[in-house]
Image: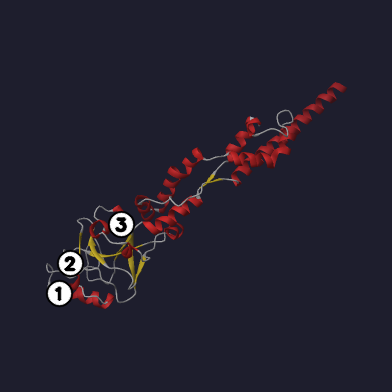
Amino acid sequence: MNDILQAAALVGAATALSAKRAVLLDNITAWAESHPYKAYGDRNDSLSPEWVTLLLEDGDKFRERWWDEVESESYHYADWAYLHDECLSDFRERLIECYPDEVDEDSDWSDLPDDVHEAFNEGECVDTSDLLQTCLRHASRTVNIVAIVSDPNSPDDDGDEPGAIRLPHCDLSDEENEAKQRYLVETFGIDGWAQESMYYHERLCIPGRLDLEHVYEHGVPETVTITPEHYMVFHTAWNGSGAMGTPHSAKTVTLPAKFIADEGRKWGLDSVYGFTGTVWRPEL
């Protein structure tokens, strides 16, 4: 009878210890999930024009690529040692209680049982938010952005580019040129003829900077506010042509716009005009 009672007691103790271990391992996994490895950005981290183009075109694809190429890669170079030490410090007493034959006061992370390592690995994660914010912030100051402006009230009714804002041109009819000139004077207070358009298809673009952190959080803006600070450039990216003038609007006007990274185009504004930083400085 005593043997039976003793055996039952041993089974009960083993069962209780097994239950304690299961709870402990779940707690370690949860601890790892709440203590991610943090990848911090530095002054050299930024986004290339290609990355910015993806952000402006499709925020979801940008996030997918960030995960695939940055966050998942961070697991390979992450230094987990300090997190292992911190986790061991927080759970040492319970580890000794649950693994009395394997863990003591002098044990380090490498001495712990495999199931403890597996529990931590199951919850380990990487936080690249600081790196991402650093890249977005730096790119906001260095990547040239162009707002391609349109207006439903523009006299141009091009099937491919509805609402494009263009200059008067000698290849167009008097009626078309009068409508364009009248629109430019009334909307911006500028003389379209004075800008010396090379080709009739050149359209209004506004160079500047864009707050990419805001774009990441809230999406790409649908309008641009043109102020007297902004440079107005009439340009065609597919052949590199552009008007000679770069006027400033006499009025503050908000119009629909599409935003693109200038370096993403073979014949962008900078490659054609070679603008200085002053042109790119205004916020869009």
> Which residue in the protein does label 3 denote?
262
Q: Which mark sits nearer the N-terminus, 2 or 1? A: 1
| Amino acid found under the numbered disc labelled 3 | Asp
Closer mark to the observer between disc 3 and disc 1? 3
SS under mark 1: helix
Please tell me the numbered disc located at residue 197: 2
Q: Residue at x 40, y 58 (%)?
A: 140
| Amino acid found under the numbered disc labelled 1 | Glu
Q: In front: 103, or 28?
A: 103
Q: Which mark sits nearer the N-terminus, 2 or 3? A: 2
What is the quadrant of residue 109 in the picture? Answer: top right
Q: Residue at x 62, y 39 (%)?
A: 84
Closer mark to the observer between disc 2 and disc 1? 2
Query: In whole angstroms, how far apart are the C-alphas of marks 2 and 1?
Result: 17 Å
> Which residue in the protein does label 1 denote?
175
Q: Which mark sits nearer the N-terminus, 3 or 1? A: 1
